[in-house]
Amino acid sequence: MERCWEEIPVERPTFPKIKERLKKVIGAYGDNIVDVLFKRMEQYAMDLELKVAEKTQQFMDEKNRSEQLLHVNFFQTAALTRGEHVDPEAFESVSIYFSDIVGFTTIAAAGSPMGVVSLLNGLYTFFDGVIEKFDVYKVETIGDAYMVSSGLPVRNGNRHAAEIASMSLQLIDGIQKFAIPERPDAELKVRIGLNSGPCVAGIVGLKMPRYCLFGDTVNVASRMESTGEAMKIQITQETKNLLENIGGYRTVERGSVPIKGKGMLTTYWLLGAT
C-alpha cells in the first residue's frame, strides 16, 4: 500500500500487480472480495477518464472561442494604434441584451459610497458568473446597466437567440437570491430587454479602444429594456420568431408598446423554458 503513494508514477505498482499481491495476502477465501474491489476500482478509473476527456473538450472549446475573440479585438486595436484604418464588420443576425437594476439610483442614494461599490462588485461578479456559461459576449457595463451580445464577434448560426434567452432566464432566477449588503431586507429587481437582427460592430477609439455595436437592432433592444417591467424579459417579434424556430421557450404577447423612432411595436414577455 505504501508503494501506491510513491510520488513518481512509474514506481507505483500497476492494478494487476496490486490485485495479485492482495490475493496472496487475503488468500483464497477473500478472492471474491478482491474481485469486487478491483472491478469497482477499474470502473472508477474508466469514469474518471471519461470525465477528464469531457472537461478537456470543454476547455478546448472555450479556448478556441477565447482565441477568436482575442484575434478580433487585439489585431483590430493594434491596427488602430498604428494609425491604420479598420473596417467595421457587418453581422446578418445577432441577439442583443440590455438590462438595468430597477430603482438603483434610490438604492445607491440610501447607502454609503463603499456600500455602492460593494453592491456593484457583487452584481458584476454574479452577472459574469452567469454570462460565462453561455456563448455570449459582454459588450459593456455602465453602472448597473449591462449590454451583452450573442452571434458576434464570433458567429454561431441562429443559436444566438437561444443563448441570450437562456442567459436572461438564469439571471432573472439568480437575482432573486441576491442580497444587498447594507439593505438585506430590500429586494433587487432587474429589467431585461432583448432584440435580434443585423448590426455593425467595430473597434472605436485609440487611447481606450472599445468594441462597439451600431444599428437599429441595438437601439430597439435598448428600448425593450427601458419600456419593460421589473423582473420581466421583454422581447421583440424578431427574437420571438427565432425562439419559436429553435423551440423550448414559452412566450406571451404583451401587446402594442410605443417605441421611440419606431411607433407602436408588438412585443412579448419571455416566460421561461420548456
Image (tube, helix red, strand yellow):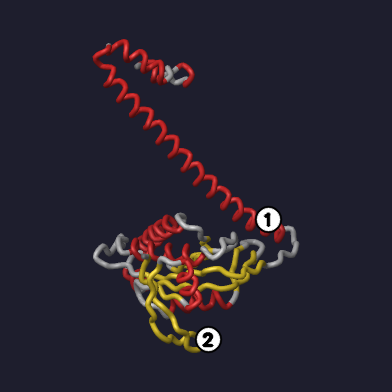
Q: Badge 1, how many Cα within 10 Å: few under 14, some, many 20+?
A: few
If you read the primary sequence from the N terminus, does the residue marked by circle 1 or circle 2 appear first? 1
Secondary structure category for the residue under label 2 = loop
Q: Is residue 257 visible?
A: yes
Residue 188 in the image, given as x and y percentages of width and height:
32, 67
Q: Is residue 20 left or right of residue 202?
A: left
In three-dimensional space, the C-alpha distance between marks 1 and 2, rounded to whole angstroms, equals 36 Å
- Residue at image x 52%, y 72%? 196
Regarding mark 1 in the picture, which secondary structure is present there?
A: helix
Residue bearing the label numbered 1:
75
Placement of the C terminus among the 4 image quadrants:
bottom left
Residue 161 appears at what percent x and percent y? 49, 67
Residue type at mark 2: give it: Lys
Q: Amino acid at mark 1?
A: Phe
Residue 171, located in which quarter of the rendered image?
Answer: bottom left
Q: Mark 2 packing: few (<14 Cα in 10 Å), some, or many (20+)?
A: few
The residue drawn where x is 39% and y is 58% is 126
